[in-house]
Amino acid sequence: MSALSVGPTGRWMRNMETLDVKGLSCPLPVLKTKKALEKGHNELQIDGNSQVSLENVSKFASSQGFAVKTLKDNPNDWSIVINK
């Protein structure tokens, strides 16, 4: 179960695991995501900087039954949250 904290807007937020895959070439971002999910995380924020990695991580997460929400989608800087 995730702990709660007050976010920047003053609303309660769940603390979630963050995975940084910046600078990694595929398939490493997908493998790191898979490993984090195997640890039992049902919610994970993933930050990266390659569009190919974004596409591959998103496809992998969806194939595992996770919803994918985009927080930030710039060509060389993205963040997504995956959860069940």
Image (cartoon, rainbow, N blue to C red):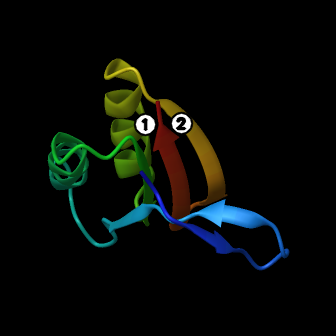
The numbered dot on residue 50 is: none
The earlier-in-sequence mark between 1 and 2 is 1
Quadrant of residue 18 within the rendered picture = bottom left
Residue shown at 25% from the left, 48% from the top: 33
Secondary element at tag 1:
helix
Q: Is residue 3 above or below residue 52?
A: below
Q: Is residue 52 left or right of residue 74?
A: left
Left or right, 14 with reference to 11: left
**Coordinates of residue 29 in the picture (x, y in percent):** 24, 53
**Is residue 36 placed above or below 61 in the rendered structure?**
below
Give the secondary structure at mark 2. Answer: strand
Q: Amino acid at mark 1?
A: Ser
Residue 7, given in percent of the width and then of the height, sits at: 72, 74
Q: Which mark is residue 68?
A: 2
Question: Which tag is nearer the camera, tag 1 or tag 2?
Answer: 2
Q: Mark 1 near mark 2, Cβ–Cβ under 8 Å?
A: yes
The percent position of residue 68, horizontal first and vertical second, equals 53, 36
Residue for point 66% across, 63% down: 13
Which of 2/56 is in front?
2
Q: Neighbour class for label 1 at 10 Å: few (<14), some, many (≥20)? A: many
Q: Residue at x 38, y 63 (%)?
A: 17
Q: Residues within 10 Å of mark 2 (few under 14, many from 20)?
A: some
The relative height of residue 65 versus residue 43 in the rendered view (above or below) is above
Which residue does the numbered mark 1 point to in the structure image?
58
